[in-house]
Amino acid sequence: MGLFSFTQDVAIDLGTANTIISYNGKIVVDEPSVVAIDGQKKMIAVGEKAKQMHEKTNPNIQTIRPLRDGVIADFYACEMMMRGFIEKVNMGSKLFTPSLRMVIGVPYGSTEVELRAVRDSAEHAGARDVYMIFEPMAAALGAGLDVEAPEGNMVIDIGGGTSEIACISLGGIVCSESINVAGDVFTNDIQNYIRQQHGIKIGERTAEEIKCAIGAAVPELENEPEDYVFTGSNMLTNLPQTVTLNYSEIAYALEGSLAQLDEALMQVLSDMPAELYSDVVKNGVYIAGGGALIKGLTKRLSDKTGLQFHIAEDPLRAIVRGTNLALKNMDRYSFLIRA
Ligand code: ADP
Ligand code: MG
């Protein structure tokens, strides 16, 4: 043991929507990637508490999502957020400052500068030893796939800001596509639809709730969710108005964005070497990230492609699970990045 027993292992999924931290193998933080700051740029809340304030702030408070489209859009806020979360983790060990060894999931195709930014944020937040892993690789590990096998493993990770589709073989990404169409865009589609079709003002948080309750990728589901009833302000009269929304309507609202996802998927399939394609036909495609929970998504995608689709177990946590596996097998896996 000796000196190094003070090293603590931290795996982080620094997502555009949610940050999940696993500390010595246990999930200790699972909160929205949001910080709230005051007029002096001092952090007043982080995570769930900050998200509660979103769209309900007064002029002295600002809520920030530091990551946009999969990359750090606001460095200062990102660092503050990471520090806030890491402080929550460290609470138990006031006696000594452990040296933190971190693996962080980053989008595939991050530039050198973007990797640096993640690394800097982590170091400023207290990390001693920082490694990164590409998220599609982490998603595949988290879905329980043998990423080192000479076999085509395909994953789709639909997060808040980006959807990444990748085919993996022999511990590397063979072909991939990344689009900025994911959960945030779906939420936005629902807001626009409700404004245009029902003439009602609707905030982001309500639209997200509707998406999670009745968001569908096909107009007809086997297990139909109950209609969603909500009251908003009529845009013409400014009086309260109640509407009842059906999931088929939401499928209609999401159609344009989902079609872009179909297209990206078809692109990866067409780029894929034939031998790997046969493996994917045999093994199916795994979907991770919160977007995997859109109802009827596997049906939609298999109707389009003729392939089988599986939702990874607990898809919102698949990336952090995979990141933690990478951390535990650090000596074995050559695909960890040390930018
Ligand atoms: P990121 O990795 O970018 O942080 P996540 O994988 O955590 O993203 O997924 C977050 C996204 O998933 C959000 O846009 C959220 O609204 C969406 N989401 C979560 N649960 C559901 C659900 N049940 N149905 C549809 N979308 C969902
Ligand atoms: Mg993610």
Image (tube, grey):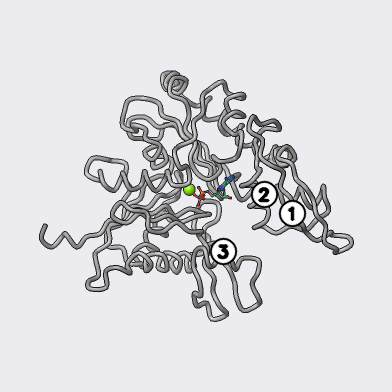
Alpha carbon of mark 3 to alpha carbon of mark 1: how far? 21 Å
**Residue denoted by label 2:** 210
In-image side of 5 versus 184 (left or right):
left
Separation of disc 1 and disc 2 at Cα?
9 Å
Crowdedness near tag 2: few (<14), some (14–19) or many (≥20) residues, C-alpha within 10 Å: many
Q: Which residue is tagged 3?
A: 51
List the single residue furthest toward the front. 226
Q: Is residue 339 visible?
A: no
* Label 3 CA crowd tier, 10 Å (few <14, some 14–19, many 20+): many
Contact between labelled residues 2 and 1, with CB atoms less than 8 Å apart: yes
Crowding around mark 1 (Cα neighbors within 10 Å: few <14, some 14 to 19, many 20+) is: few
Q: Which residue is mark 1?
A: 230
Quarter where residue 291 is shown: top right
Residue 122 in view (yes/no)? yes
Type of amino acid under label 2: Ile
**Residue 47 drawn above or below residue 171:** below
Give the residue at x 72% y 43%. 227
**Separation of marks 2 and 3 at Cα, in angstroms:** 17 Å
> In the image, which disc is placed on residue 301?
none
Contact (Cβ within 8 Å) of mark 3 with mark 1: no
Q: Name the residue at 54% across, 67% down.
A: 50
| Towards the viewer: 317 or 101 | 317
Q: Quadrant of residue 295?
A: top right
